[in-house]
Amino acid sequence: MGELKVLNSGGEVAVTTRLSDLLQWARKWSLFQYPFVTACCGMEFMATAAPRYDIARFGAEAPRFSPRQSDVLWVVGTISQRQGPVIRRIWEQMADPKWVVAFGTCASCGGFYDNYTTIPGVDKVIPVDVYIPGCPPRPEAVLDALMLLQEKIQANDRKPVVVPPHLVPERAPGRTGKGKS
Ligand code: SF4
């Protein structure tokens, strides 16, 4: 009892005995994202949304630029002291349940900006669910973060997690040249 099996691609039939499991399943596959992009990590964020990585496979391709319509706040890039209150306000305006992803080293811990203008990690201002290391993180790491977040949503787990290193980035078919990734 209580097991959730809801798969739509492998031919399995949806079976659940708990409404909460079904709700969490629906939530994790329909995440509306609010991208708060401040710096160079934004390029990798855009790459993840492009066809090669195809974040639409995870039901997370739709950006919303109103916090009231968003489920996940992606903090992408360096956060200055002046931006702190702004991002706090955005987070407060999001409806529950809501999640936060710290995208890249700067958003996670301030990166190499050890100075008075930079917040050393957005978790000094708002709670973070998933941290993505990297300067910038590769799109594969971003997808790893999204899948981790989906697992956390399904399990109703709010404990913060860090995306583990992606040691062997996968190459798309036909991309074998040196320096290409
Ligand atoms: S982690 Fe690196 S790439 Fe990302 S915003 Fe900071 S300096 Fe730029």
Image (cartoon, rainbow, N blue to C red):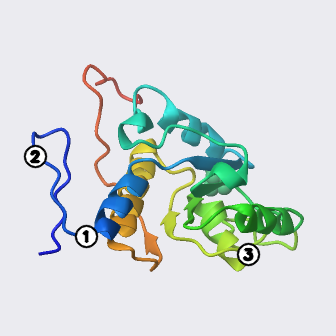
Residue 153 image position (x, y, % from top left): 40, 66
Asked whether, in this view, residue 174 is left or right of residue 147, the answer is left
Q: CA distance from mark 1 to mark 3?
A: 35 Å
Q: Earlier in the sequence, mark 2 or mark 1?
A: 2
- Residue 105 visible in the current orientation: yes
Mark pair 2, 3: CA separation: 42 Å
**Residue 32: x and y, percent?**
55, 47
**Mark 2 Cα within 10 Å, few/some/many (few <14, many 20+)?**
few
Q: Is residue 145 above or below residue 161?
A: above
Image: 46 above or below 39: above
How far across and how far down the image is residue 135, in percent? 57, 54
Give the residue pinned by disc 3: 125
Q: Is residue 176 above or below residue 134?
A: above
Mark 1 belongs to which amino acid?
Arg
Q: Going 81% across and 68% down the picture, which residue do you hit?
A: 84
Q: Nearer the viewer, mark 1 or mark 3?
A: 1
Q: Nearer the viewer, residue 139 or 67?
A: 67
Q: Amino acid at mark 2?
A: Glu
In three-dimensional space, the C-alpha distance between marks 2 and 1, rounded to whole angstroms, equals: 18 Å
The N terminus - image quarter: bottom left
- Asked which secondary structure carries label 2, the reply is loop
- The residue indicated by pointer 2 is 12
The residue type indicated by label 3 comes to Val
Residue at left offset 36%, top offset 28%: 178
Secondary element type, mark 1: loop
Q: Residues within 10 Å of mark 3 (few under 14, many from 20)?
A: some
Residue in view at x 74 percent, y 68 percent: 92
Q: Nearer the viewer, mark 2 or mark 3?
A: 2
